[in-house]
Image (tube, grey):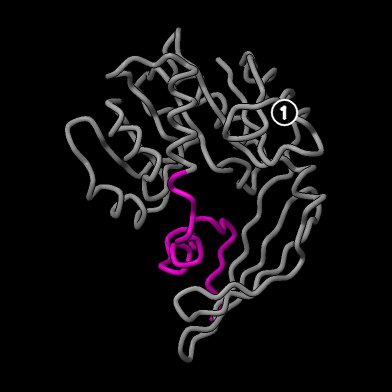
Amino acid sequence: MQKETNTWFKSWFDTLYYHILYKDRDYTEAAQFMDKLTAYLNLPVGAEILDLACGKGRHSIYLNSLGFDVTGIDLSENSIEEASKFSNERLHFEVHNMCVPLGKKFDAVFNLFTSFGYFEDEADNLKTLKAIKANLKETGFGVIDFLNVDFVSNNLIPDEIKTVDNIDFHIHRSQQNGYIIKEIAFEDGAEKYFFTEKVKALRLKDFELLFKEAEIDLLEIYGNYKLQKFETNHSPRLIMLFK
């Protein structure tokens, strides 16, 4: 049963199986990252934050619990439907394309957990950065939390079977044509499924060029969720602070 489309993230992120496979994500680590980041940015209680590509809202919900006014957007209707169960007067979710400005300005725009570089049309990467800039107040900060391509390349596990909720997910990882690719095959009952995750292998130098074209100022770079120094071959993350 083929469930893939040209824009893979529209189909895969909207499935129950995506959330099953990644149900063990580290919520404690995510919370500690948000604590560290918002304190470092000195965001006051009540500051307005846009969570770009928010998924089911794990970061948005936690940020709201800290006292921030949070808007989460995502293309996945199912994810937004789930996240919206937690909505309140200072926590809002909506289906929206992150390539397009939201029409409102924020104190901070966060793009977290490698939610960038998915697009088939590479021009959409630049459009997204320009949209982030348009969504920022004059004193606002943008943050992109991306994977570190060199670290991933050095630690790539080509094949793995991950069993979650009695489903064996057969995962194959590779690098092809400038992308990091994860192929996921599994069966549920009599049905067979196959999905592909595909992320552009953007390194710091690639982001620097995109930032320059978008007229964005890159301020600081970090290599992990503790906001420690970025090291090309050793840091698991590439976290960029800009305005």
Q: In this orientation, which residue lies closer to the viewer: 19 or 13?
A: 19
Q: Secondary structure at mark 1?
A: loop
> Hey, which quadrant is residue 183 in on the image?
bottom right
Q: Which residue is mark 1?
A: 230
User: In the displayed structure, does residue 201 sit left or right of residue 195?
Assistant: right
Snapshot quadrant of residue 171 = bottom right
Q: Tell which of 220 and 33 is nearer to you.
A: 33
Q: How many marks?
A: 1
Q: Residue 211: give x, y in percent of width and height.
A: 66, 21
- Taking the view exactly as shown, the residue that stands out farthest to the top is 138
**Closer-to-camera residue (77/203):** 203
Q: Three-letter amino acid code at disc 1? A: Phe
* Residue 242: % across, % down: 58, 18
User: Left or right: where does residue 178 sit relative to residue 48?
Assistant: right
- Relative to 56, residue 98 above or below: above
Q: Residue 56's spot in the image, x, y percent?
A: 37, 50
Q: Is residue 71 magenta?
A: no
Q: Is residue 3 above or below residue 97?
A: below
Query: In the image, what residue occupies the spot 63% across and 42% down?
Result: 117
Q: Which residues are magenta?
A: 1-28
Q: Residue furthest left?
A: 89
Residue drawn where x is 77% and y is 57% of the image:
156
Across and down, in percent, residue 173 comes to: 73, 63
Q: Is residue 181 left or right of residue 41?
A: right
Tell me the quarter of the image containing the C terminus.
top right
